[in-house]
Image (cartoon, rainbow, N blue to C red):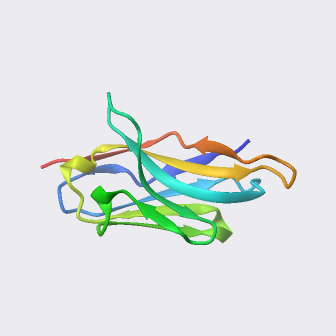
Amino acid sequence: QVQLVESGGGSVQPGVSLRLSCAASRSIYRIYVMGWYRQVPGKQRELVASITSDDSTNYADSVKGRFTISRDNAKNTVYLQMNSLKPEDTAVYYCYARATLSRMSRADDYWGQGTQVTVSS
């Protein structure tokens, strides 16, 4: 089974930087896309950033110029560098991956457990 382990969240003041990490199971055959979503209680989960296996990236308008997504294929890990954090960035951040478990398997969606990011004065 695919496992996504997230780390790097915390409570910070506005303007501070954080880097989130998400390591996927080494047993995964292939990861097609990894990304980060965030969710505030009572609201729909929204895409923050994503990156494909060929380095194509996508960002939410609200984080463009502040957040950077990157990956390390050798470690099956994706990162989210978050700079100039704002109170509006406060949310639970979830790692996402679309992956296959073997060459014959169909790709499926997987989610991490979530890590809390709180930005307040």
Q: Is residue 25 left or right of residue 50?
A: right
> In the rendering, at what x and y percent does residue 58 appear?
45, 62
Q: Quadrant of the N terminus?
A: top right
User: Which one is in front, 93 or 98?
Assistant: 98
The quadrant in which residue 53 appears is bottom right
Q: Residue furthest left?
A: 121
> In the rendering, at what x and y percent does residue 110 appear?
62, 43
Q: Is residue 67 left or right of residue 74?
A: left
> In the rendering, at what x and y percent does residue 5 appear?
56, 48
Q: Residue furthest top?
A: 42
Q: Residue at 19% across / 49% down in the picture?
A: 87
The quadrant in which residue 85 appears is bottom left
Q: Residue at 55% across / 68% down in the picture?
A: 71
Tally of numbered tags = 0
Q: Residue furthest right?
A: 104
Q: Is residue 113 left or right of residue 60?
A: right
> In the rendering, at what x and y percent does residue 13 appear?
18, 54
Q: Is residue 83 left or right of residue 37?
A: left
Q: Is residue 62 above or below residue 116?
A: below
